[in-house]
Image (tube, rainbow, N blue to C red):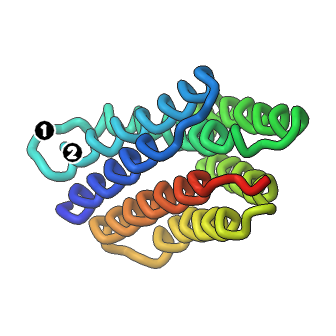
Amino acid sequence: MILAGLSEFLIAAGIVFALLNIRPSSTPINALVTIGLLSTLVASLLGAVTFLSAFDTSQYHQVFTYFSKHIGMTAFIIGASWSHLKSHTAKQFALSILVVAAGSFTVNFFTKLDLLSVSIMLIALIFVAYQVAYNKQAQNNIFISIALLISTLLWGAIIKNTDIRIGIFHVCVAAFLIFFTLALRVKRVA
């Protein structure tokens, strides 16, 4: 599983890029971004250890991946976009997306609804794309992020080799992190 393991480092690089380039102005929102990204970083590093070594950290990798998938990535999307939300209503809607993500986290303990977390992330991304409509470059980067997220579902259905499938999934997640970060690091046009 060498491709799966090495590609975990691409996710880690994408996270470092995001942490260096997304600077929310509010401390609670900054914590939201940081927690979202750090949960994904821990999952990717544990995944690298699992796939590239004899140490079995798969149980811990699964726990952090679960948290990242159901809450962490949505928290990153909402937190990173917070300064681009134009109104109080937009911020309330963003917070409601986080509440739904927390509900997804809970529901998936009892029933396997993996597409629910992806759907919530897609709703959050479409919402953010709408919020940055004034900036076409940022909006285009978000649309690329959406395509990358959706493509992870496609690769899972097409590619049968587990190592290659996981490797491509990781490349898509890393690219998603980079394009989404580029979208929000673009200066606001007033």
Q: Residue at x 18, y 38 (%)?
A: 56
* Residue 185 at x, y percent in the picture: 56, 52
User: In the image, is residue 35 above or below residue 93?
Assistant: above
Is residue 71 found left or right of 93 in the rendered image? Answer: left
Is residue 147 found left or right of 44 in the rendered image? Answer: right
Element carrying mark 2: helix
Residue neighbourhood size for the residue with mark 1, other residues' Cα within 10 Å, grouped as few (<14), some (14–19), many (≥20) = few
Residue at the extreme right of the image, as rendered: 89
Residue denoted by label 2 = 50
In the image, what residue type sits under mark 2? Thr
Q: Residue at x 65, y 50 (%)?
A: 121
Find the distance from the CA under tag 2 to the CA under tag 1: 6 Å
Quadrant of the drawing holding the N terminus: bottom left
Q: Residue at x 47, y 78 (%)?
A: 158
Numbered badge on residue 21: none
The answer to which image quadrant residue 29 occupies is top right
User: In the image, is residue 163 above or below residue 37?
Assistant: below
User: In the image, is residue 182 above or below residue 12?
Assistant: below
In the image, what residue type sits under mark 1? Phe
**Front in this rendered view, residue 47 or 77:** 77
Residue denoted by label 1 = 55
Q: Are marks 2 and 1 in contact (CB under 8 Å)?
A: yes
Q: Is residue 150 visible?
A: no
Q: Residue at x 17, y 62 (%)?
A: 2
User: In the image, is residue 46 above or below residue 160?
Assistant: above
* Residue 83 at x, y percent in the picture: 70, 39
* Residue 115 at x, y percent in the picture: 64, 53
